[in-house]
Image: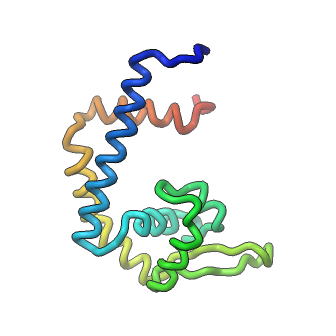
Amino acid sequence: MTENPEPEILDAWRGVLFTQARVVQGLEADMLEQHGLPITWFDLLSRLSDAPHQRMRMHELEEASIFTRSGITALADRLENAGLVRRERSAEDRRGVYLAITEAGLDKFAEVWPDHKRSIQNHFGQYLNAEDAQALSTATKKILNPNAE
């Protein structure tokens, strides 16, 4: 493998990086305007709503979160104070703590999700045809899971 990436690779990298920043800025602005909810809150609610038993250990959230790693405890505190999540002690490991989504958190997620999907279309999807979307999806899956066939 070469140490210096080809110009096409650097262009692709810049494109992904700058596109991600612009799209997230648009999504954040829409979510704050429409629901008063920071996108980091929605990311956490989304992860928990999809998780088995709708809960995850704190270290799992740190690894899975799109937007924050070091601030996950503070973020969890804010969501807990808003009544959207709760901490649960692990029955298997007394030191372990799960973060679980509450009914209010599920309701908030369900309220925000349709508008967020429209926002994704407005800031991202409208610029891609089916072929572009498939190529981008294929490329990102290769990067995210390089050992998959």
Position in image of residue 127 (x %, y %): 21, 38
Which residue is found at the position 51% from the left and 82% from the top? Answer: 80
Q: Quadrant of residue 130?
A: top left
Colour setup of the view? rainbow
Position in image of residue 146 (x %, y %): 59, 31
Which residue is found at the position 37% from the left and 24% from the top? Answer: 11
Residue 53 visible in the shown view: no
Position in image of residue 118 (x %, y %): 22, 57
Which residue is found at the position 74% from the left and 73% from the top? Answer: 96
Which residue is found at the position 55% from the left and 71% from the top? Answer: 54
Residue 56 vs 125, above or below: the answer is below
Position in image of residue 126 (x %, y %): 19, 43
Q: Quadrant of residue 71?
A: bottom right
- Which quadrant, please, contains the C terminus? top right
Question: 51 or 124: which is nearer to us?
Answer: 124
Residue 104 visible in the shown view: yes
Question: 141 or 95: which is nearer to us?
Answer: 95
- Which quadrant, please, contains the N terminus? top right
Report whether 93 appears left or right of 67: right
Q: Quadrant of residue 114?
A: bottom left
Report whether 17 appears left or right of 111: right
How many marks are shown on the rendered structure? 0
